[in-house]
Image (tube, rainbow, N blue to C red):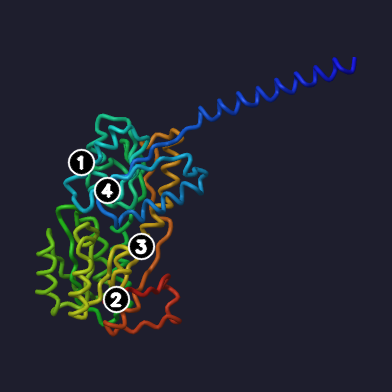
Amino acid sequence: MIFVFLFIVFIAGLILCYSSYLQTNAEEKEHKVYKIGVLTVNDERLAKIEGMHEGLKQYGLSDNDVDIIIKNASGDVNRLDQLGQELVNIGVDVIITTGTSETTAAKKATMDQEIPVAFIGVGCTVELDLVKDNISTACNITGVDSHYVQLSGKRLEFLKRLVPNTKKVLVLYNPETTPFGPSSIFLYDAADKLDIQLDIVPVIDHKEVLAVLNEKGDSVDGVMLMCSLLFESIIDSIVDITLEKQLPVMGVTDRQVEKGVLAFYGSTTYNEGIQAARIVVNILKGQDPRIIPIESPEQLELYINLDTARKLKVDIETPDMPFVDHFIQNRER
């Protein structure tokens, strides 16, 4: 009788082990690996993707759960349309874009597709007709706004606070990529309160940027760069000229401060990426991007380059500036 009992226990154990084996195999077969396409115009913007990658891990998606496919135009904006179409052809679950040009290309590539697009750190999306509204986008696109438009006045205020004798500021923008109108409201309001005269100049290529800086550099007290790939691509040259002319520059990214501009205020590219991860996860879980509101940046920071301040003879007393989040050193130029 005892042998019969033991035999039954043995058979039951085998059945249990086999059932467990079948269940494990089924789970492995059902394991979903999400294809995340990334469209970026250059290496500089990949910090946003690094942040997003870290954010995905915080939401429980490991490297085994995602396949991140990066299409990098390496500075050639004209390649973005082709690269966006390549991501569509691969059949990615979502396309992540790192700027205005990338988002425009992704919108074009997904015009007749159901592939969601999530941008990281883009402003003026309504004005550029990328989305219909910030609350309900009415299309396959959503993401994290850089808020650089709304922060334009605050950036001017910080420039004045760091360099109190600032009376006239040269503002450079590229009309071919980003409209100046939305930012102008905040800039003019701040300029009136701060008693600052604005010299606003549109520039569309590298030669124009450098020519304007050389021509007007001696008649202004500082420079404000608006958001544009144009300035990203020649930031070293901008830093060289403005240091030579002893002009403090308020940039639009933390990376620009690392490369030598005096200051930046806003959301860092890495933090924008971390924040965007939540949107990406929601999309991957099936949420319709049409009902995902565009988010404002969650964290705003002020960066100051101490080496540049020293070269410009700007008095920076770090203990007396609790409003500064990061004091950094750039490479020797």
Residue 325, position as x, y percentages in the image:
43, 70
- Measured as percent of width and height from the top left, residue 220 is found at 17, 77
Q: CA distance from mark 4 to mark 1?
A: 11 Å
Front in this rendered view, residue 66 or 200: 66
Q: Earlier in the sequence, mark 3 or mark 1?
A: 1
Of label 3 and label 2, which has the lower sequence position? 2
* Badge 1 element: helix
Q: Mark 4 or mark 2, which is nearer to you? A: 4
Badge 1 local density, few (<14 within 10 Å), some, or many (20+)?
Answer: many
Per the image, the residue denoted by label 4 is: 72
Badge nearest the viewer, 3 or 2: 3
**Residue 35: which quarter of the image?**
top left
- The residue under label 3 is 266
Label 3, label 1: how far apart the Cα atoms are = 29 Å
1 on left or right of 58: right
Image quadrant where residue 217 sits: bottom left
Question: Which circle, 4 or 1, is nearer the viewer?
Answer: 4
Looking at the image, residue 290 sits to the left or right of residue 195; the answer is: right
Which quadrant, please, contains the C terminus?
bottom left
> In the rendered structure, which disc, 4 or 1, sits on the residue that comes first in sequence?
4
Instruction: Check disc 2: other Cα within 10 Å, few if <14, some if 14-19, many if 20+.
Output: many
Residue picked out by circle 1: 81
Q: Upstream in the sequence, badge 4 or badge 2?
A: 4
Q: Which residue is mark 2?
A: 160
Q: Mark 3 to mark 4: distance in Å?
A: 25 Å
Q: Give, as a three-letter code, the residue at label 1.
A: Asp
Q: Are marks 3 and 1 in contact (CB under 8 Å)?
A: no
Quadrant of the drawing holding the N terminus: top right
* Amino acid type at mark 4: Asn
